[in-house]
Amino acid sequence: MAGKDKALGVVRSELDALRLRIIENHLRVGQKASGKTIASLHVELSENEGILWGRQAFEVLESGRKGGKVPKGFYQIIQQWVKDKGIQVDKPKTFSYFVARKIAREGTQLYRNGGRDDIYSKEIEHTTKVIMERIFGIFEKDVEHINLNNQ
């Protein structure tokens, strides 16, 4: 297997492992509601790069959502979230409406608490380091092999 193919294999395996660690962290802290975020995580590999894709709102897993403009029908999104999380309240529509208003005014609790860095940030940093070390090792052996053959 050529060095480039080996390197792409390293990228694939490390991104797959990263995906699984992010999912584990997401579940560990109880963020899962509908499962859409988990389902959105997938690895794409091309000849020159590897990408771990996630849904558009992926960043809020660590940052939370700041207050401000919200999508139309936001309280209905919150109502679905309440249902998906299995939260039991007497008046789900009223509860969802007031939660949506509070988030629009102040942001989510996670945002107000300053966010976190234990869902994907540390994992990405670790994965980047491991990929660089493993790929360097592959090409270091190729260079060593070339030098031995040219003596």
Image (cartoon, rainbow, N blue to C red):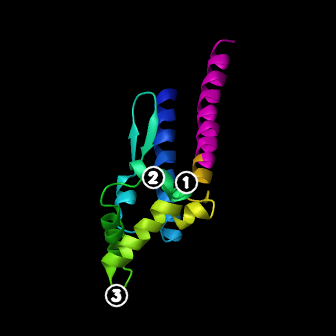
The amino acid type, in three-letter code, at marker 1 is Tyr
Residue receiving disc 2? 58
Task: Indicate whether residue 129 is drawn in magenta.
Answer: yes
**Residue 144 on the magenta span:** yes
The outermost residue toward the right is 151
Of pointers 1 and 2, the one earlier in the residue sequence: 2
Residue beneath label 3, please? 90
Question: Which tag, 1 or 3, sits closer to the chain's start?
Answer: 3
Which residue is tagged 1? Answer: 120
Residue 62 appears in the figure: yes
Are the residues at dot 1 and dot 2 in contact (C-beta closer than 8 Å)?
yes
Name the residue located 50 percent from the left edge and 39 percent from the top edge: 11
- Read off the magenta span: 125-151
- Mark nearer the N terminus (2 vs 3): 2
Residue positioned most to the top: 150
The answer to whether any part of residue 17 appears in the image is: no
Give the residue at x 39% y 80%.
Answer: 87
**Secondary structure under the numbered disc 3 in the rendered image:** loop
At mark 2, the secondary structure is helix
Quadrant in the rendering for residue 43: top left
